[in-house]
Image (cartoon, rainbow, N blue to C red):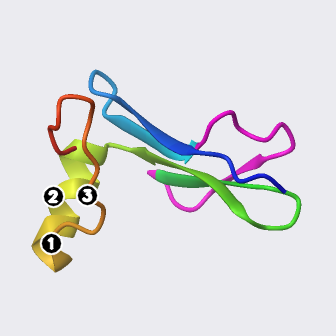
Amino acid sequence: MKKKKWTYDYDKECDQLFVGEYPMVRTAKLFQLNEDMAVYLDKNGNIRGIFIEYYEIDLKKKLKKIAGPIFKMENKNGRQI
């Protein structure tokens, strides 16, 4: 199986972050983990994407307080998100 490139898309207006394969596998299903997070899983249970709502407002601030940056992602201009 050819590995697909993972990408991210952050919608600042809605404060939603998607990190995952592009293009997404057609058979991937969305599974809600809690009210703010969901994962896309393929038929074998492999994670194909992650969706986080209220990323900047809620999750990112909590993660920095607990453990510092877990993911270091930069946009095209080199700004960390």
Q: Which residues are magenta?
A: 21-36
The residue positioned 71% from the left and 53% from the top of the image is 3
Q: Secondary structure at mark 1?
A: loop
The residue beneath circle 3 is 72
Query: Which element carries disc 2, helix, strand or loop?
Result: helix
Q: Quadrant of residue 72?
A: bottom left
Q: Are marks 1 and 2 in contact (CB under 8 Å)?
A: no
Which residue in the structure is indicated by mark 2? 61
- Label 2 to label 3: alpha-carbon separation: 14 Å
Identity of the residue drawn at 11% across and 71% down? 65
Amino acid type at image mark 1: Gly
Amino acid type at circle 3 is: Lys
Name the amino acid, label 2: Lys
Spatial separation of the CA atoms under disc 1 and disc 2: 9 Å
What residue do we see at 67% from left, 47% from top?
A: 4
> What is the magenta segment's predominant secondary structure?
loop
Seen in the image, is 31 located left or right of residue 57?
A: right
Q: Nearer the viewer, mark 1 or mark 2?
A: 1
Q: Quadrant of residue 14?
A: top left
Picture coordinates of residue 66 (x, y %)? 17, 77
Task: Tell me the number on the disc at residue 68.
Answer: 1
| Magenta segment includes 35 | yes
The location of residue 79, given as percent across then percent down, is 14, 38
Q: Secondary structure at mark 3?
A: loop
Q: Nearer the viewer, residue 47 or 4?
A: 4
